[in-house]
Image (spheres, helix red, strand yellow):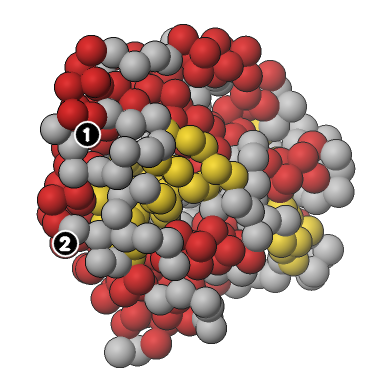
């Protein structure tokens, strides 16, 4: 059965029901963390995949971290505003960034930003997702091949919803344009929530985003799935082919992970990593994650640090030739 998208009502109920258990009290007594709530900063506007995942993490995380988690939505600058704020915060575990490859691996290497990659220490990778290319049922293309044909026949007329320059949607559309040798024009809207709103409102013609953002509309029939940027079809939407199946070599997986300011003590990083790992194994967390069509591919701080360093090096070579 296709997972149902988490409703605001359910999420609110989950938040209200989350309480400090005896286990979390014991964790607090033995903790290296400051005796205050943890501010969990989402760098994009509400309504996108980051804020949906963050809402679940902050709803259930207290039991496993021994501290309340406060969800902070800090959009702006394509994530740079939030990243700079967390990078400049006290490195004690009291403020964490919900990061991703564009904020933490790509953009600091190709743009002049108020923070650097080295300003962060990896804590835990929560999961990763592929993007789903989508359109509305009234558009003149209903497959990815038809979209490419339309773009080829109508240069620059195809306008799509994008997130931010060098962001997730931006990157996968650039990959599609390169492999298909066509031109399309993206409108940068700051995040998945506004991007889908503009698509549904008829102001743009296509988008590519996470299942947690587009899944509800796929199920309702208000969006049509064209292809998924993974090497295999999605378990949640098996009817949507991969882009490779359709003849377009577009593969991109977007991770979401917890990052702490550089200088955070090793024992704090280890404690946070262990707590997030226990959280991602809990029945309640997994149930809520499944309801937004997502899953878990956890990495602790050591493994995450290795994969992050490899990703950053690969992007540096691809974009800068270094």
- The answer to which of 35 and 266 lies nearer the viewer is 35
Picture quarter containing residue 13? Answer: top right
Residue 16, above or below 147: above
Is residue 139 positioned above or below 280 on the image?
below
Residue 78 in the image, given as x and y percentages of width and height: 60, 62
Tell me if label 1 and label 2 are in contact, CB under 8 Å. no
The image quarter containing residue 133 is top right
Which quadrant holds residue 10?
top right
Tell me how far mark 1 sits from mark 2, CA to CA: 20 Å
Residue, disc 1: 275
Vertical order, 270 against 158 (above or below) = above
Residue 156 spot, x, y in % from top left: 80, 69
Q: Position of residue 235 (x, y in %)?
A: 38, 26
Along the viewing direction, whichever of 291 and 273 lies nearer the viewer: 273
Q: Mark 1 vs mark 2: which is more N-terminal?
A: 1
Q: Quadrant of the C terminus?
A: bottom left
Farthest-out residue, right? 202
Q: Which one is in front, 276 or 16? A: 16
Q: Secondary structure at mark 1?
A: helix
Residue at x 25% of width, y 21% of height:
24
**Mark 2 lies on residue:** 306
Residue at 70% x, 70% y is 183
Horizontal side of residue 288 vs 151, given as left or right: left
The residue drawn where x is 50% and y is 30% is 55
| Secondary structure beneath label 2 | helix
């Amino acid at each position: 059965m296709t997972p149902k998208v988490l409703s605001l009502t359910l999420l609110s109920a989950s938040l209200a029901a989350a309480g400090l258990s005896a286990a979390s009290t014991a964790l607090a007594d033995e903790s290296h963390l400051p005796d205050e709530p943890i501010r969990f900063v989402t760098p994009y506007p509400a309504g996108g995949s980051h804020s949906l995942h963050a809402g679940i993490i902050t709803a259930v995380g207290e039991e496993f971290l021994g501290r309340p988690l406060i969800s902070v939505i800090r959009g702006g600058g394509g994530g740079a505003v939030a990243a700079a704020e967390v990078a400049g915060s006290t490195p004690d575990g009291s403020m964490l960034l919900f990061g991703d490859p564009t904020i933490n691996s790509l953009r600091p290497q190709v743009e002049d930003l108020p923070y650097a990659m080295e300003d962060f220490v990896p804590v835990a990778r929560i999961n990763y997702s592929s993007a789903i290319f989508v359109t509305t049922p009234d558009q003149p293309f209903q497959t990815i091949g038809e979209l490419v044909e339309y773009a080829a026949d109508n240069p620059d007329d195809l306008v799509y919803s994008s997130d931010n320059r060098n962001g997730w949607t931006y990157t996968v559309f650039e990959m599609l344009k390169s492999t298909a040798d066509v031109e399309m024009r993206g409108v940068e809207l700051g995040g998945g929530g506004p991007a889908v709103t503009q698509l549904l409102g008829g102001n743009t013609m296509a988008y590519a985003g996470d299942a947690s953002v587009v899944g509800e509309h796929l199920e309702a029939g208000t969006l049509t799935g064209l292809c998924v940027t993974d090497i295999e079809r999605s378990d949640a939407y098996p009817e949507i082919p991969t882009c490779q199946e359709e003849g377009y070599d577009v593969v991109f997986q977007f991770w979401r992970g917890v990052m702490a300011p550089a200088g955070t003590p090793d024992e704090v990083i280890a404690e946070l990593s262990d707590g997030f790992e226990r959280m991602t194994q809990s029945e309640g967390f997994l149930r809520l994650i499944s309801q937004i069509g997502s899953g878990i591919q956890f990495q602790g701080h050591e493994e995450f640090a290795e994969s992050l360093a490899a990703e950053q090096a690969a992007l540096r070579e691809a974009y800068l030739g270094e």
